[in-house]
Image (cartoon, rainbow, N blue to C red):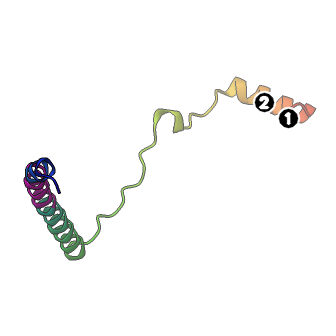
């Protein structure tokens, strides 16, 4: 390698080493966090799922008597 190439490589090598060490530390932190989550999930029972709460669009409201009579008449006539 030429002297210029060696000089450039020296600057880049330090940065690469520093970045590689930081990345290795970051990976180790993620692995430790994942291990702790897995241990916690094995130790604690899963929470029971709560039944879904009905929304306003899911509420069933009985139809007024007049409308029920109209629907019954339509069904009898074969329109419904």
In percent of width and height, residue 53 lies at 41, 45
Return the residue nearer the eye: 31 or 7.
7
Residue 72 higher or lower than 50, as above or below: above
Question: Pointer 2: residues within 10 angstroms few (<14), some, or many (20+)?
Answer: some
Q: Nearer the viewer, residue 21 or 25?
A: 21
User: Which quadrant of the view contains residue 80?
Assistant: top right
State the extent of the magenta-drawn residues as a range: 11-23
| Most common secondary structure along the magenta stretch | helix
Q: Is residue 32 above or below residue 75?
A: below
> Furthest-front residue in view?
2
Q: Is residue 56 above or below residue 2?
A: above
For label 2, the residue is 71
Displayed quadrant of residue 32: bottom left
Q: Which residue is mark 1?
A: 75
Q: Quadrant of residue 36?
A: bottom left
Image height of 34 relative to 9, above or below: below
Disc 1 is placed on an element classified as helix
| Residue visible at 42% across and 49% down in the picture | 52
Asked whether the residues under the numbered discs 2 and 1 touch, taking CB atoms below 8 Å apart as contact, a structural biologist would say yes
């Amino acid at each position: 390698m030429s002297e210029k190439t060696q000089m450039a490589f020296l600057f880049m090598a330090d940065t690469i080493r520093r970045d590689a060490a930081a990345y290795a530390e970051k990976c180790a932190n993620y692995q430790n966090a994942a291990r702790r989550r897995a241990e916690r999930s094995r130790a604690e029972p899963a929470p029971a799922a709560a039944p879904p709460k009905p929304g306003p669009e899911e509420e069933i409201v009985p139809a007024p008597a007049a409308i029920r009579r109209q629907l019954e008449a339509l069904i009898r006539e074969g329109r419904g």
